[in-house]
Image (tube, coloured by chain):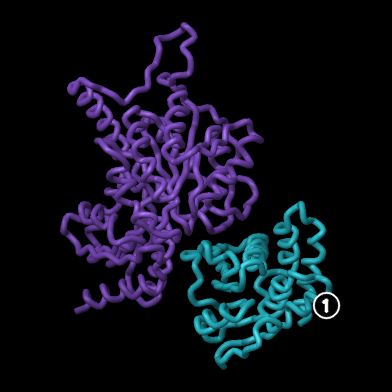
Amino acid sequence: MKTCNILLAGFGGQGILFAGKVLAYAGLIDNKQLTWLPSYGPEMRGGTCNCSVVMSDESIGSPLVVTPDVLIAMNLPSLEKFAGKVVKGGTIILDSSIIDKKVERDDVNVFYVDATKLAEENGMEGLSNIILVGKMFKELGFCSEEALFKAIDKCVPARKAEMVEKNKEALRIGMGQ
Amino acid sequence: MGEKVLMKGNEALAEAAIQAGCRHYFGYPITPQTEIAAYMSKRMPKVGGCFLQAESEVAAINMVLGASSAGVRAMTSSSSPGISLKSEGVSYIAGSDLPALIINVQRGGPGLGGIQPSQSDYWQATKALGHGDFQLFVLAPSTIQEMVDFVSLGYEVGEKYRIPTMILSDGMLGQMMEPVEFPEAKETAQAEKTWATNGHKNKRKKNIINSLYIEPQVLEDLVKERFERYEKIKATEQRAEEYLVDDADIVVVAFGASARVSRNAVNMAREAGIKAGLIRPITLWPFPENTIKKAVSHTKDFLCVEMNMGQMVDDVRLCVEGKSEVSFFGRTGGMIPTPEEVFNEIKKLSEKEAK
């Protein structure tokens, strides 16, 4: 891996920033260079939210992802805004429970994951974000499996310790898709 | 060095200040720097320090003046419009020969402007953050590690020369996370501040901190003495990073967030066979004249890249003295230039030179 530019996008409250943080910590544990940059501002309240994560073996210049190698899209406005920006040969992973449209490009790899439905069926509402991260890991293997699971330990705050296992289970569900 | 952790720039800077012995923080919320105040509000009580959310930016900077007068490491932080409000107090701090740490996490301006990252306070920070003849020691971090490292550097240089320090950051650096290491806890023994108004206990003459001098000759003498210190700072404290500059025909000059973008663009140019390099001023005042001047002999074109309408480019032109071409590319209002945009500018210069 030289540099992997990842963009996660969806509604505020879907755990976009958290999912980005898990990716970032996984990279950190694997001793990669990385940056995490959130969108910030009034648009976050109920509106769209996105997060750039750059992982690299070399030092990173701009942390702002304009042309992603990987797009994780969790709502339609995000897909419409960013699908065209993904590099040729790049990857789009989307939550098909929420987005009922197909991606109209044949030069990218698209994975449709019924993430919100899967989360609900497995009693883990709100973890569709992590299911999508699990799918991304399965398809791209951007870090070691050990680092990805350790990243969950790092990212879940102590006051929500009971969520650690649920997040890990969500990763496994995503990896099984 | 300790373990690498992931932290937002704002939070890392706040933690660094606490580790550097800052126990007096006075602030007021404003996007995109509010995490500094929020972090301080949680951490300060645990280390026996003082976190105070003032009633306004003006109050906060005057509290810094008071705390610094007593010889402690004090700090305030804000973003562009809030820094303008602090400018009177900054001038008083400089006029009182006090060290103090002032953080500007810049956003778009003028006026209330916007809340996205910007570098449009370069002129304010380096030329006139308030009235009167004075300078600040201005540091421009471009990584989260530098957001940490420049806190203690800022205090040390500020205390050595009795000059306020500004860390000129921006919304991108404040909000982003990157791995960062905190230095091993070192002796926080600070140089003795013989000038501080911290109680003479009948053992020395009383100290007075003041910026009012009615007698013109007295004031002129004091300002001249201060400017002798500024000359020493110019001679000893210039800092810049050079990247692929030695053989470069085209040198990009950029600081902070725009330097990160420019570094990508320089790499793209090298891959395209263009000899491009990057000079990244780390101290904005004193401006790293020596580094720019050294590069003039082999540089055909300097390209200044900033997130404003062209401010630092004036200082680059002063150093280049017309010996090479100096051009400018910038985005403003909260827009961040892309590496492709900067690369295109480099390419244009390269094509022009080839003609």
Q: Colour of chain B?
A: purple
Quarter of the image where the N terminus of chain B is located: top right
Tell me the kind of residue under disc 1. Glu
Q: Position of residue A136 (x, y in %)?
A: 68, 77
In the figure, B311 relative to B37: above or below? below
Q: Position of residue A26 (x, y in %)?
A: 67, 64
Give the quarter of the image for residue B161. Answer: top left
- The answer to whether residue B250 is left or right of residue B29 is left
Q: Please name the residue shown 33% across and 68% down the image.
A: B276
Q: Please tell me the colour of chain A.
A: cyan
Q: Residue at x 53, y 79 (%)?
A: A82
Instruction: Determine crowd level at label 1: few under 14, some 14-19, many 20+ residues with C-alpha closer than 10 A.
Output: few
Residue at the location (39% across, 55% down)?
B112
- For the question of whether residue A154 can be seen, the reply is yes
Could you tell me residue B342's position as x and y percent? 35, 70
Front-most of B284 and B250? B284
Q: Secondary structure at mark 1?
A: helix
Residue wearing tag 1: A121
Work out which quarter of the rendered image holds the C terminus of chain B and state it: bottom left
Residue lying furthest front in this view? B55
